[in-house]
């Protein structure tokens, strides 16, 4: 879900995460849209609220990366060795984008590893921590995440007001909630009714006993 203030979240989400520490998983949450598992990646104050409530200022990062994934064929050691070899080729002068196109396992490979502008919380913690430690123009050493091994290049930073974008997201969530809840309630009522009828017809149907 990215880094967002609690204001505007569904009440069930707020209740679930407000006492959950960073890195922990909240209890199972049921809403009109279904069941949710929420993990708190990081806690902190908003990076900058403007004087107007319509402003939400965040620092965005433009970055490229190369990913070598782990799979049944490529072990952790093999993936790290490959990413170290690519790092050496970059240090020797080969263009980062060319190597990303040729060797990266990420969907961004055709774009030379370009990830575009990233908001805080939009990437996994290990990736974001390494990215945030880089100045524009710098390239990271090998970075391990749950997806594999990365090389990250930070191109630039910028401050952006994402208030309008956030409000549009809120509006979409509210509309979805309004549409989904009645349908969910109808479906759940039908399921409960059907389960009751099945139980009356066959008392052992829901007992789990073998007959």
Image (cartoon, rainbow, N blue to C red):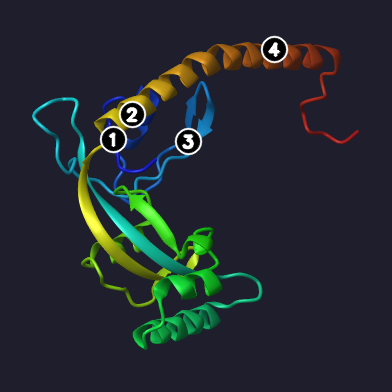
Is 56 located above or below residue 44 in the figure? above
- Which residue does the image show at 29% across and 46% down from the upper left? 21
> First in sequence: mark 3 or mark 1?
1
> First in sequence: mark 4 or mark 1?
1
**Left or right: 81 in relation to 10:** right
> First in sequence: mark 2 or mark 3?
2
Q: CA distance from mark 2 to mark 1?
A: 6 Å
Is 61 located above or below residue 140 in the figure? above
Helix, strand, or loop for circle 2? helix
- Which residue does the image show at 78% across and 33% down from the upper left? 208
Do labels 4 and 1 touch, CB within 8 Å?
no
**Which of the numbered marks, if any, corresponds to residue 190?**
4
**Which of the numbered marks, if any, corresponds to residue 185?**
none
Q: CA distance from mark 2 to mark 3?
A: 11 Å
**Left or right: 43 in relation to 202:** left
Give the image location of residue 98, x and y in percent. Answer: 47, 73
Helix, strand, or loop for circle 3? loop
Do labels 4 and 2 touch, CB within 8 Å?
no
User: What residue is shown with label 1?
Assistant: 18
Is 38 located above or below residue 84 in the figure? above
**Which of the numbered marks, if any, corresponds to residue 28?**
3
Give the image location of residue 58, x and y in percent. Answer: 22, 44
User: What residue is shown with label 2?
Assistant: 15
Is 188 located above or below residue 67 in the figure? above
Circle 2 residues within 10 Å: few <14, some 14–19, many ≥20? some
């Amino acid at each position: 879900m990215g880094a967002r203030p609690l204001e505007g979240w569904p009440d069930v989400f707020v209740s679930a995460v407000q006492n959950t520490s960073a890195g922990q998983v909240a209890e199972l949450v049921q809403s009109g849209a279904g069941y949710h598992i929420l993990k708190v990646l990081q806690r902190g104050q908003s990076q900058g609220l403007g004087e107007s409530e319509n402003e939400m200022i965040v620092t965005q990062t433009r970055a490229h990366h190369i990913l070598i994934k782990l799979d049944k064929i490529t072990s952790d050691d093999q993936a790290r060795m490959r990413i170290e070899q690519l790092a050496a080729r970059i240090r020797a002068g080969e263009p980062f984008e060319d190597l990303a196109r040729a060797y990266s396992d990420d969907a961004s490979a055709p774009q030379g590893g370009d990830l575009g502008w990233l908001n805080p919380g939009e990437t996994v913690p290990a990736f974001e921590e390494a990215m945030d430690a880089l100045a524009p123009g710098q390239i990271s050493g090998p970075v391990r995440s749950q997806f594999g091994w990365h090389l990250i290049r930070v191109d630039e930073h910028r401050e952006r007001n994402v208030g309008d974008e956030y409000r549009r997201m809120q509006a979409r969530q509210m509309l979805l909630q309004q549409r989904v809840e009645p349908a969910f309630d109808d479906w759940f009522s039908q399921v409960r009714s059907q389960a009751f009828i099945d139980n009356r017809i066959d008392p052992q149907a829901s007992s789990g006993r073998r007959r």
